[in-house]
Amino acid sequence: MEKSLMLAWILVLSTAMAVPPCQGYYSDDEPHVLAPKKVTKLHFYFHDTLSGKNPSAIIVSRPNTTIASNSIFGTVVAIDDPLTVGPEKTSDVVGNAQGLWVSTGRDVPCLTIYMDFGFTKGEFNGSSISVFSRNPITETERELAVVGGRGKFRMAQGFAHLKTYFLNPKNGDAIVEYNVTVIH
């Protein structure tokens, strides 16, 4: 009993001890006042091209299975897709989306995506937004989560409303309209 009481006191005292401040790990020179949040609305088209001589999306891994299936479940794709002002491939390019998507829907096609949308023109040149979300691709309209950003979008949050503009079911090529609301 005395040993357990002594152990209890050691635990209480050890948690009550003050932790010495870390030297050189952080700076307390910057003000701790957060700037007011700004809402920015973005509109662009995302061109995901798996076919042709110059694809912007490449399959990097497929599931190792002996079951014959037409499913893409388990497929991992790396992307570097152009973002354009309009849906035409000849439309002005305003940036690119780089990242991965994984086919995670076993029965119903669905992707889990991580993408960084980097902007290369205009007011947001050099800035990006990051998206990490579930993308139920069979739904014509869907929503993804904006989970961060860089540059003018540092500490961003928000959502992207997607609408499939074009889909070729034979080769997987797609053009998707993005309406993004970014809070930063």
Image: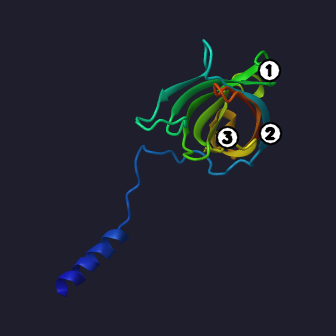
* Res. 159 visible in picture: no
Q: Position of residue 19 (x, y in %)?
A: 38, 60
The kind of secondary structure element at disc 3 is: loop
The kind of secondary structure element at disc 1 is: loop
- The image shows residue 168, relative to residue 102, as above or below, that is above
Of the numbered discs in the image, which one, if any, rests on residue 41?
2
User: Where, by quadrant of the figure, is residue 29 drawn?
Assistant: top right
Residue linked to disc 3? 137
Of labels 3 and 1, the one closer to you: 3
Residues at marks 3 and 1, CA–CA distance in whole angstroms: 21 Å
User: Where, by quadrant of the figure, is residue 8 drawn?
Assistant: bottom left
Q: What amino acid does circle 3 point to?
A: Ile
Image quadrant containing the N terminus: bottom left
Q: Residue at x 63, y 40 (%)?
A: 131
Tell me whether circle 2 and circle 3 mark residues in contact (CB < 8 Å): no
Return the residue found at the far top: 53
Q: What amino acid does circle 2 point to?
A: Lys
Residue linked to disc 1? 88
Q: Position of residue 183 (x, y in %)?
A: 73, 45
Which residue occupies the foreground of this view, 117 or 163?
A: 163
Q: What amino acid does circle 1 point to?
A: Glu
Crowd tier of the residue under label 2, counting other residues whose Cα lies within 10 Å: few below 14, some 14–19, many 20 or above: few
Tell me whether circle 3 and circle 1 mark residues in contact (CB < 8 Å): no
Q: Residue at x 77, y 30 (%)?
A: 44
* Res. 69 visible in picture: yes
Of the numbered discs in the image, which one, if any, rests on residue 122?
none
Q: Position of residue 7 (x, y in %)?
A: 23, 77
